[in-house]
Image: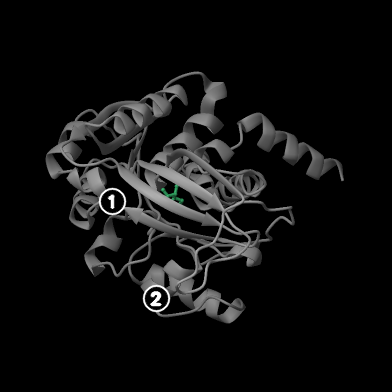
Amino acid sequence: MIYVLGSINLDTSLEVERIPKKGETLIADGCSMGLGGKGANQAVAIAKLGAPQNKMLVQMIGCVGKDATGSELVNTLEGFGVGTSNVRKVNRATGSAMVMVTPKDNRIIVYGGANSGITKTDIDEALCKATSADTLLCQLEVPLYVVAYALRKARSLGMTTILNPAPAKALPDDLFYSVDVIIPNEVETQELTGIVPRDPDSIRDAVDKFHERGVQYVVLTLGERGIALSDGNRIFEQLPAYKVAAVDTTGAGDTFVGAFALTYPHIGMYSFKEACAFANRAASIAVTRRGASESIPSAEEVNAMYVKEIKK
Ligand code: RIB
């Protein structure tokens, strides 16, 4: 089982030509609403990409409000095959995000709301049956002290722990000792290491900083510069980014992280690299579609892309 501790948001996406200037009102070309939140997106990626195995693979741990939006988002998660018995309803408004999507990139503002209602007791209850065969995946859109507690607890149970440190924020040193795999993007890498990963030397230095802080596996998602990965033996590789016609990058990072968590095996560099390659393909499909959780491809689509690649 993969347990995903994280946020569940209602995303409102506005398609705009460009980001508005100070004091300017801009008319959007399109508007849509859907399930988002880094935690929910990653859980949906695991469910969608793992569906051929035809069993419950992923349990969401989080909170929504006691409002209609909260119930709708829980139903949507279930519709994707995500277990929601550890999603609690609290007396706060369901989390929401305003996403401005331009032809080049996006800007996101998140209101945490119910997401901040999660407690250590929720973690104890959710992980009461977890074993060393299970994985815990976290991001940083729920309170940091709960994330730290969950990672420590998962580590004490011998679970695999994966941290996507998004959105970027400073983290206490001891948190890294409970993390097996860290998956930051460029901004998060800079926040956590003080290094801008823009060339081979700076990328290697940033990766080494994470190893020095106690993380064995490091995966940097570097946008157009692709993926940099390193295992505890400092084997270092880079996977190129796919050149695709991107329409919306919202949730692409979450697709990568969820796909990685699904396929990440517990042994060896070869398998680690394969998990990254699978995740890289999945994310490259997600950016060609609009929305967050809706843009995540199925395993068949990712495998079809792989088949095309090897036939070239
Ligand atoms: O990573 C994309 C997600 O960030 C969006 O779905 C939004 O809800 C914010 O959490």
Q: Which residue is mark 2?
A: 193
Residue 84 % position (x, y)? 31, 27
Secondary structure found at label 1: loop
Up-down: is 240 above or below 305?
below
> In the shown orientation, is residue 140 left or right of residue 124?
right
Q: Which residue: 26% across, 45% down?
A: 115
> In the shown orientation, is residue 253 left or right of residue 145?
right
Near-viewer residue (173 or 144): 144
Residue 293 % position (x, y)? 50, 39
Q: Which residue: 40% across, 69% down?
A: 210
Q: Is disc 1's CB within 8 Å of ligand 1?
A: no
Q: CA distance from mark 2 to mark 1?
A: 26 Å
Q: Residues within 10 Å of mark 1 (few under 14, many from 20)?
A: many
Residue 126 % position (x, y)? 22, 32
Mark in front: 2 vs 1:
1
> In the shown orientation, is residue 134 left or right of residue 107?
left
Near-viewer residue (165 or 234): 165
Residue 308 in view of the camera: yes
The mark nearer the N terminus, 2 or 1, is 1
Quadrant assignment for the N terminus? top left
Mark 2: amino acid: Thr
Q: Quadrant of residue 140?
A: bottom left
Q: Residue furthest left?
A: 121
Q: Residues within 10 Å of mark 2 (few under 14, many from 20)?
A: some
Mark 1: amino acid: Gly
Q: Residue furthest top?
A: 54
Up-down: is 294 above or below 180?
above
Residue 250 in view of the camera: no
Residue 170 % position (x, y)? 29, 70
The numbered mark at residue 112 is: 1
Up-down: is 63 above or below 239?
above
Q: Quadrant of residue 173?
A: bottom left
